[in-house]
Image (spheres, rainbow, N blue to C red):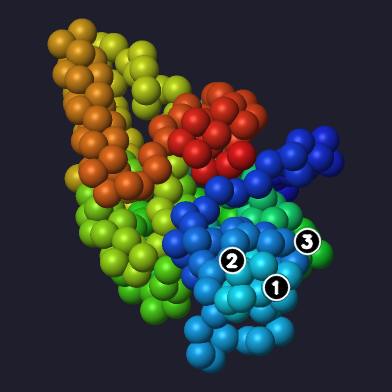
Amino acid sequence: MRKILNDEFISKLETLSFHMNSFMRGYFGGNHRTSAYGSTVEFADFREYTLGDDIRHIDWNLYSRFEKHFIKLFVDERQMFIQVYLDCSASMEKADSKKSEFALKTAASIGYLAVHNMDRLSYRLIQGDSAFDLSGTIIGKDNFFRTISLLEETEFKGEADLDKAITGQNDVGTNDGLTVIISDFLTDSNWKKAVDYLLYKKRQVMLIQVLAPDELKPLYTGRIRLVDSESSSPIDDKNMKMKITKADIKAYNEALKDFKEDMKNFCMARGVNFISISSDEKIEQLIFNKLAQVGTVT
């Protein structure tokens, strides 16, 4: 069984917190400050009293100075709903590069940040055209660690239709938190439609693309037989024999560059955070550097 979190790394995670869009409504009782005013003990501002306001919030010291009624406004803090969608297709399981292990560590790290910051959390495992809810809504660290033991047993197989799996969900929430999609996005499914659906639901969205070293810099040359990790059998039409030349490698690198650039431009146009990372990087590089660079953690 994989061990995707350890005590040393968890202690490092506890130094971070999520940065969420201030306009999100979320749930009462969390740590995220919103642009609205609420009922915490931390003072935010004054405004003039209007009929219907709670008279307990009137500042009588200001009344004695200005002979007008002003009420105190306090910081509003909310609990957000963090959803983590994990692509569990066979293309994410590359034993030589530990691609799936990196994806699982990413999911676990983001989840721990959520519960540490008193947020609600859910894991959705995508296989085929469905997103399986691993353990329902997770609140608190005890519940989180029980769920992590299940996450460590995740199998990566078959294909994953990000579009149907995500748009088919009827409980993604509305304007109440962050959705993270962890995948290589090397799919024929329309993942862009899934992102637009989440944005329609007013979710904050982040895409984390995990690629293996040989996907970023293939070293194949000569005559080889390519076997698609998502193929159903050795004679599947997805598999092929071919001779790879330097021109083929160049064409692949250019196509990958264009693909990543298209993802980046799509996300920038919609205010979606996008991170692409190699699975041979340390998980600390993603969590403490890349997430901070896009402003997701502080």
Looking at the image, the residue that sits furthest to the bottom is 52
Q: Tell me which amino acid carries mark 1.
A: Ser
Q: Tell me which amino acid carries mark 3.
A: Lys
Side of 106 where 125 appears, left or right: left
- Which circle, 3 or 2, is nearer the viewer? 2
**What x and y, as percent, mark residue 207?**
40, 46
Side of 161 where 94 appears, left or right: right
Q: Is residue 295 visible?
A: yes
Secondary structure state at the residue bearing disc 1: helix
Q: Nearer the viewer, residue 235 or 204?
A: 204
Gap between marks 1 and 2 measured at Cα: 15 Å
Taking the spot 60% from the left edge, 49% from the top edge, the residue there is 18
Secondary structure state at the residue bearing disc 2: strand
Looking at the image, the residue that sits furthest to the right is 7
Q: Which residue is mark 2?
A: 46
Side of 238 where 1 appears, left or right: right
Q: Nearer the viewer, residue 126 or 46?
A: 46
Label whose residue precedes the other's in the sequence (3 or 2): 2
Taking the spot 29% from the left edge, 35% from the top edge, the residue there is 264
Gap between marks 3 and 2 measured at Cα: 37 Å
For label 1, count other residues whose C-alpha is less than 10 Å away and answer few (under 14), some (14-19) or many (20+): few
- State yes or no: discs 3 and 2 in contact (Cβ < 8 Å): no
